[in-house]
Image (spheres, grey):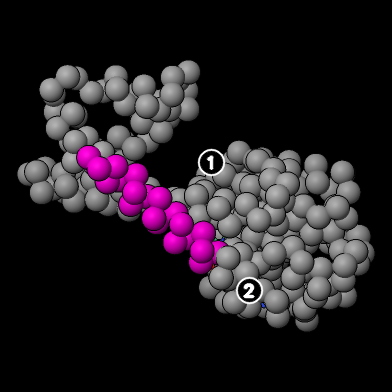
Amino acid sequence: MTVKVLLAGCGNMGYAMLAGWLKSGQLRPSEAFVVEPNADLRARAEKLGVATGASTSQLPVGTPEIVVLAVKPQVIREVTASYEHLGNGKTTFVSVAAGTPIATFEQVLGDKTPVIRVMPNTPAAIGKGMMVVCANPHVSARTKQFVDDLLAASGAVATIDDEKLMDAVTAVSGSGPAYIFHFIECLTAAAEHAGLPAETAKLLAMQTVYGAASLAFESDEEPGLLRQQVTSPNGTTAAALAVLMGDDRLKSLVTEAVEAARLRSVELGK
Ligand SMILES: NC(=O)C1=CN([C@@H]2O[C@H](COP(=O)(O)OP(=O)(O)OC[C@H]3O[C@@H](n4cnc5c(N)ncnc54)[C@H](O)[C@@H]3O)[C@@H](O)[C@H]2O)C=CC1
Ligand SMILES: O=C(O)[C@@H]1CCC=N1
C-alpha cells in the first residue's frame, strides 16, 4: 500500500509528531513510513507499529502524499536532495527545520514542488503542541487541509502568510517549551532553597505552571488581570513581582532571549 506520510528523521521532533498523529487516530501506523539512520530510533518508531528504513534505498513503493522532513537544518539540503525524484510532482514536502526557507526546497526539488514549512513544538507528542504553517502556492487546497488536520491532532494550528515571520515564530513557540521547562527548573530550585523537600518542590513548580497556563486559557480575563488577582496590596506576590518586574527585568530578559533565538533562526537559514 502507498504510504500517506513518509517521515524523514524520527528524532525528538519527528517522533513527537508521529506519536501525536498515531495516538489521535488521525494517521494509522500502516499509512506511515519512517526513514531514520539511527537503529535505536527506528526500533522506537517500530514499537508504534510503523515500518521503517535506514535510508532512501529502502523506501516503500509508490508516491507518498507528504514527505515530512524532520532532520537538523545543517543536513536538510542534502537530505532533501535524496528525495529529488519526488519533486515537481504530486508529493507535498513538509519541513519542520528551523530557519530553512521554502526557497531552499524549491531550489533542490524543483520550483513547482508543493512545500509547507511548519514550526511545531515538542508538546505535540501529547496533542498540546503549537503548530504554525506557511505554504507555497503549489500546495493544493485538499493537501493543505490534510496537513492542517494532521497537525491539528498535535495541537493548535495557526497559519502565517509572511514567511519572514517564521523566524519569530520559531523563537517564541518552537523554542518556547525549553524556556518554560527552565522556568520550572528555576522555581523548583528556588522552592528547595526556601526549605521544601525536592519532590514537593518539583510538584509545586510543575502544578503551578500547569494550573496558571490552564487558567489563562480557560478564563476570559487577560493574563495581566489574572496576575493582579493573585497580587494582594502589600502582600507576598507584590514582594516577588517587585523583583521580577522592577525595571522590566524579566520582560527585558525574555525579549533578549527571544531575539537571540530569532537571529539564530535567520542565521540557520543562510
Ligand atoms: N526539538 C524541537 O523542539 C524542535 C525541532 N525543530 C526542528 O526539527 C528538526 C529536527 O530536530 P530534532 O528532532 O530536535 O533533532 P534530532 O537530532 O533529535 O532528530 C533528527 C533526526 O534526523 C535523523 N537523520 C539524520 N540524517 C537523516 C537522513 N538522511 N534521513 C533521515 N533521518 C536522518 C537523525 O538520526 C536524528 O534522529 C530540526 O530541523 C529542528 O530545527 C522544530 C521545532 C521544535
Ligand atoms: O533549537 C532548535 O534549533 C530547534 C528549533 C526550535 C526548537 N528547537
First in residue order: circle 2 vs circle 1: 1
Residue beneath the point at 44% across and 54% down: 258
Asked if the magenta segment contains residue 182, the reply would be: no
Q: Position of residue 90 (x, y in %)?
A: 91, 60
Q: Position of residue 106 (x, y in %)?
A: 81, 68
Where 166 falls versus 109 (above or below)?
above
Whole-angstrom CA distance, mark 2 to mark 1, is 31 Å
| Residue at the (70%, 76%) spot, across then down | 77
Question: Residue 15 sits in which quadrant?
Answer: bottom right
- Location of the N terminus (image quadrant): bottom right
- Residue 227, image x and y in percent? 31, 26
Which residue is label 1 attached to?
A: 128
Q: Are marks 2 and 1 in contact (CB under 8 Å)?
A: no
Q: Amino acid at mark 1?
A: Lys
Q: Within 8 Å: ligand 1 and the Cβ of disc 1?
A: no
Q: Is residue 257 magenta?
A: yes
The segment highlighted magenta reads: 246-265
| Foreground residue among 168 and 54 | 168
Residue at image position (69%, 64%) is: 101
The mark found on residue 213 in the picture is none
* Residue 60 falls in image quadrant: bottom right
In x, y percent, where is residue 131? 62, 46
Residue 270 disc label: 2
